[in-house]
Amino acid sequence: MTGRDDDALTWDGDDDPTLDLGASEPGVEAGPADAESIAPSDAEPPDTATAVLPDGYTAVGKGSEHVGSAEATAEKTPMGNTELIVLGVLGGVYALFAIGWLIGGQRLQGWRPFLVTDAMYQGSLWLAVLAPALWFATVFLLTRASRTWVRLAWLAAGVVLLVPWPFVMIGAVGR
């Protein structure tokens, strides 16, 4: 009788006790009946607190419905009312900033020949108009997994950085 250590090849997981299910002689493999005798059918399902699979793994087979996943254990909490209201107000501020950049940029068209060419002016005008919406969407998407204060801090920084200065300095009517 040769031992498993004398095999020419060993594989990762050869120490698994389920591989020797009733194999008392070399070359005899255990069948399904032997597997059932080792794992009784009336066994209790594993405790979901202890049986948690890492992300990307799926439990299969008997009792797999009782095995939890790391994604299921980390409950995602919905946004609270305060956060929704603050996001709505900041979204409105960003929309007003986009309108302010458009109006202020249109008011600067008379000064455009002194500053830049027409193509450069139109490109920069539309980038300025889209900047508040792009900032809001980018912060909202990139801070999904972050804490609420991080998202609100980045949105507040955008409010400070994206002030429509042409509208603030010249206004809608101009001087």
Image (cartoon, rainbow, N blue to C red):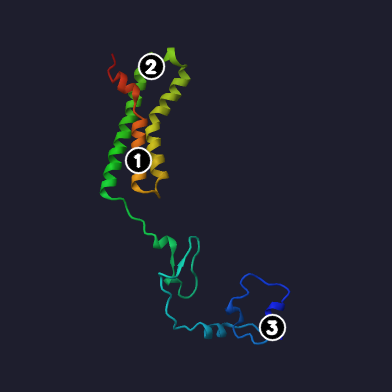
Of tags 3 and 2, the one toward the viewer is 3
* Amino acid type at mark 2: Gln
* Amino acid type at mark 3: Gly
Q: What element carries label 1?
A: helix
Sequence-wise first label, 3 or 1: 3
Q: Quadrant of residue 7?
A: bottom right
Q: Do the residues labelled 3 and 2 touch (CB within 8 Å)?
A: no
Name the residue at 29% across, 41% down: 88
| Callout 1 crowding tier (Cα within 10 Å): few <14, some 14–19, many ≥20 | few
Sequence-wise first label, 3 or 2: 3
In the depicted view, which residue is nearer to us: 161 or 88? 161
In the depicted view, which residue is nearer to us: 80 or 150? 150
Residue 132 place in picture, x, y as percent? 37, 33
Q: Do the residues labelled 3 and 1 touch (CB within 8 Å)?
A: no
Label drawn at residue 153: 1
Of tags 3 and 1, the one toward the viewer is 1
- Pick out the residue farthest to the right: 8
Residue 104 place in picture, x, y as percent? 34, 22
Residue 55 place in picture, x, y as percent? 48, 60
Q: In this view, does 85 lie to the left or right of 3?
A: left
Name the residue at 33% across, 45% down: 149
Label drawn at residue 109: 2
Q: How far apart are marks 3 and 1 (CA)?
A: 67 Å
